[in-house]
Amino acid sequence: RFEQLLAKLDPRTGNIVEENPQFIKTGDSAIVVLRPTKPMVIEPVKELPQLGRFAIRDMGQTVAAGMVISIQKGE
């Protein structure tokens, strides 16, 4: 589940170009907060690259892909 849009990034450099943007468009890069709705095995990409990448699909189409920067363990 999407929680928060933190920053918009320059796709070429990875530098932050806008803090707390209202929206992102197709092709944009961003830092977001996601909360899984089911338990999942995932690790930050720097610690374990094989488990640090993900894709989000909806209705048979990929709507997002990314890398895990950090994890906050919940209850």
Image: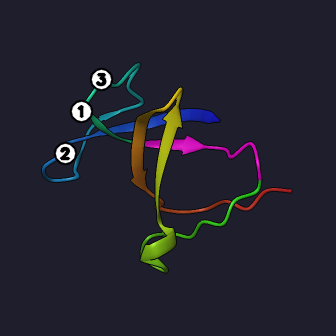
Label 1's element? loop
Q: Write the residue at 49% across / 31% down.
A: 60
Question: Where is residue 9, by image quadrant?
Answer: top left
Of all residues, the one furthest to the right in this rendering is 75
CB atoms at circles 2 and 1 under 8 Å apart? yes
Looking at the rendered structure, the kind of residue marked 2 is: Pro
Neighbours of disc 2 within 10 Å: few (<14), some (14-19), many (20+): few
Looking at the rendered structure, the kind of residue marked 1 is: Gly
Q: Nearer the viewer, mark 2 or mark 1?
A: 1
Of all residues, the one furthest to the top in this rendering is 22
Q: Write the residue at 50% across / 41% down.
A: 56
On screen, 24 above or below 31?
above
Q: Which residue is mark 2?
A: 11
Looking at the rendered structure, the kind of residue marked 3 is: Lys
| Residue 50 placement, left or right of 30 | right
Q: Which residue is mark 3?
A: 25
Residue 32 among those drawn in magenta:
yes
CB atoms at circles 3 and 1 under 8 Å apart? yes
Q: Which residue is mark 1?
A: 27
Give the spatial CA distance, label 3 vs label 1. Answer: 6 Å
Label 2's element? loop
CB atoms at circles 2 and 3 under 8 Å apart? no
Of all residues, the one furthest to the bottom in this rendering is 47
Q: Please state, as top left, top right, bottom left or bottom right, where the C terminus lies in the image.
A: bottom right
On screen, 67 above or below 21?
below
Question: Where is residue 22, by image quadrant?
Answer: top left
Q: Which residues are magenta?
A: 31-38
Q: Write the residue at 44% across / 70% down.
A: 45
Neighbours of disc 1 within 10 Å: few (<14), some (14-19), many (20+): few
Q: Position of residue 1 (x, y in %)?
A: 65, 35
